[in-house]
Amino acid sequence: MKHLLTLQDLGVDQLSAILDLADEMKTRPKAFANTMAGRTLLMMFEKPSLRTRVSFETGFHKMGGHAIYYNLMTSPLGAGKESVSDMAKVLSRYVDIVMARLFEHSDIEELAADADVPVINALTNFSHPCQILADFQTLREKKGRLEGLRLAYYGDANNNVTHSLMFGCELAGIECVVACPDDAEYRPAAEVLAAAPSTRVVHEPGPAGAIDADVIYADTWMSYHIKKDEMDRRRADLEPFQVNTPVMAAAKSDAVFMNCLPAHRGAEQTAEVIDGPQSIVFDQAENRMWAQNALMALLMRD
């Protein structure tokens, strides 16, 4: 494993190794205080960020390393004056590992192809693998396992989180149900469906998709790349797929609710769901740091 661009880059053993190490780092953080001593992480951002920047920067610091924040909107690349390929070759001479939060997935593929150091996808419009690593660490903490769980995702399914959930569930042996409007704008990408044939996509709103689920998952209806003037139309399309009390009641009595954040109460889920006793959204947010630390440590070890 040289890079992580999507969860398709991982095998079952690699996924387990990342999660096992993440658990160990969370339990014994001082034991890893020098793991990245003398090393530098470059963090490239083309999109706004809260959890991604803070979790990566803090996590690398906890391992004894130095992290650089680089805003691509003020760079030659962002201005269209330097190629991704040239940037990758230059950065490989300076830093030890790169994480990038970009719009186009093809850009991070090109970056990885020409970099001599590990490259981590910290989010593109197509894929968000680090989020799902954190989600799976959290599920193992709460449920004691991954294989055999049933996860029901509600809402806009043509996005990076849903795609990565589908890849991850296929890899981990989790039964995945996606409930979304029957419209190309909201259905998972065809290439993802082909790569995750176990996923069941349903277009019936309400509780039906949640029956016997161990996990109910929602994501924002307004990702960063979506224009604000589309909000009213998207809300009308997606509101029938809101996670609310009836949806949670259809799941198992010990089901948990997940949202990768940011979350909008009264939109993709109601306040009583995200702020209720079944919600584990802030455990997910914390585990971004531990899962990413484990990933970086394993990439650097290789």
Image (spheres, rainbow, N blue to C red):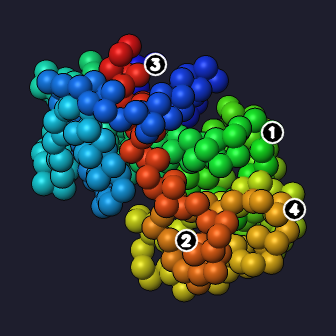
Based on the displayed image, in which of its 4 quarters is residue 116 positioned? Answer: top left
Q: Secondary structure at mark 1?
A: loop
- Mark carried by residue 98: none
Amino acid of disc 2: Trp
Query: Which dot, 2 or 1, sits closer to the camera?
Result: 1
Residue 1 seen: yes
Q: What residue sits right under mark 3 in the picture?
A: 1
Q: What residue sits right under mark 2 in the picture?
A: 221
Q: Residue at x 81, y 56 (%)?
A: 213
Mark 3 to mark 2 CA distance (whole Å): 33 Å
Query: Do the residues bearing badges 1 and 3 touch, measured as CB atoms within 8 Å?
Result: no
Based on the displayed image, in which of its 4 quarters is residue 236 positioned? Answer: bottom right
- Mark carried by residue 211: 4
Mark 3 to mark 4 CA distance (whole Å): 37 Å
**The C terminus lies in quadrant:** top left
Q: What residue sits right under mark 1 in the picture?
A: 148
Q: Nearer the viewer, residue 156 or 56?
A: 56
Going from the N terminus, do you reach mark 1 or mark 3 first? 3
Q: Residue at x 56, y 41 (%)?
A: 137
Going from the N terminus, do you reach mark 3 or mark 4 first? 3
Amino acid of disc 1: Gly
